[in-house]
Image (spheres, grey):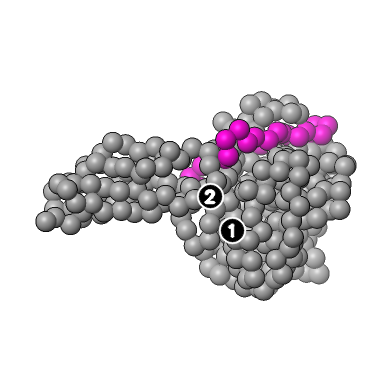
Amino acid sequence: MSLSSGNPAITLPASVTVVSNATSSTFTAEATGTLVQEVWVTGSLNGSSAATGLTVSALQIQGDPSELSGWSNGAIVTPKVALSGFAGQLVVAGNGVAKFAPVEAGNGVSFLNCCSNTNTAHYKFTGVELGDIFSVNQGQISFCLKSNYSFAQRQTTAASPRFAFDVQDNVATHHHLFYFLTEYTSNYLIFSYSPGGSALFYYVPHGTEDTLFGNGVTLHVTIAWDGSISKLYLNGALVQSKSYTQPAATWTAGSVFDLGATEYLTFGGYNSSDDLISGFTVGVPNQSVGVPNQPVGVPNQP
């Protein structure tokens, strides 16, 4: 069966083999850096065709050392998927370091140490292009977070907030549009997040903290928003749905996206995450992200 997409964002194999008596096959496609968009791939055989939809992500940072050009301050961070030419840098203060370790199917990155901006590190991206990636109108952010602490440890030595990511369109006014952080407060493990300028909180039920996010446990997080309703999914389950007011965003060359920290005015990154972050992806709600191993059906035969 021959394959085609008609979209330069997707590189396809010329054909895919469908074994005898099968009704589908799989193939691997590669996406070049581009905005979020749906792409239709068509399979053709004997004059008939069938199609399947793919979604190209606006941004994907796997958390793999191959995305980093070096280990010192200012090293270039090249995401796995991004807008053409879009890159960030590793910001290192003192003896801070980016550390990599396995998280399920791939690597993840953590930043030592939390929580001041002394002897810490994080990834920093800037520019007006962030407004093309993080749309306040509609979007979805997904990532994995592997905990390095038990709930008991978070009540004592690891109680401080740890930012998985933080996006600000205006750092001067401390205008946080999107973020996710973990913290211990008032005997609760709390996940604080923003889908577009509104501060929201999820209180992990007592007795489930270590099962959900204990030492060595990987948590799958998805935040989706549509301009009026935000949804928080943990491990694929919807745990919170909230209404919010869509903000006005002013994206400039000074807008900042930090992975693994929060940017505090002109003072640098604070509250680094020493929990592992992997598969950070910005995409479209209710759509698959990336393009691996997509099925395509066999065209109807005349």
Residue sitting nearer the eye, 181 or 216: 181
Point out residue 55 in the picture as x, y percentages from the top left corner: 46, 51
Q: Would residue 227 appear left or right of 32 to someone viewing this image? A: right
Q: Residue at x 30, y 53 (%)?
A: 51
Q: Is residue 74 a member of the stretch shown in magenta? A: no
- Please rate how many residues cluster around mark 2, counting C-alpha atoms within 10 Å: few if below 14, some from 14 to 19, many from 20: many
- Neighbour tally class for label 1: few under 14, some 14-19, many 20 plus, Cα within 10 Å: many
Q: Which residues are magenta?
A: 81-106
Q: Quadrant of the C terminus?
A: bottom left
Q: Position of residue 113 (x, y in %)?
A: 77, 41
Query: How far apart are the two marked residues, 1 and 2, measured between alpha carbons?
Result: 9 Å
Residue that appears at 49% across and 37% down: 32
| Image point (76%, 34%), residue name | 91
Q: Position of residue 83 (x, y in %)?
A: 58, 39
Left or right: residue 237 versus residue 72 is left
Q: Is residue 230 left or right of residue 155?
A: left
Q: Amino acid at mark 1?
A: Gly
Q: Which mark is residue 203?
A: none
Q: Is residue 95 magenta?
A: yes
Front residue of 226 and 69:
226
Where, by quadrant of the figure, is residue 211 drawn? bottom right
Circle 2: residue type: Val
Contact, mark 1 vs mark 2 (Cβ under 8 Å): yes
Quarter of the figure with residue 29? top left
Element carrying mark 1: strand
Q: Which residue is denoted by mark 2 in the rendering?
A: 36
Position of the N terminus, as image quadrant, is top left
Q: Is residue 134 visible?
A: yes
What secondary structure is marked by label 2?
loop
Residue at 28% over, 42% down: 3
Residue denoted by label 1 = 139
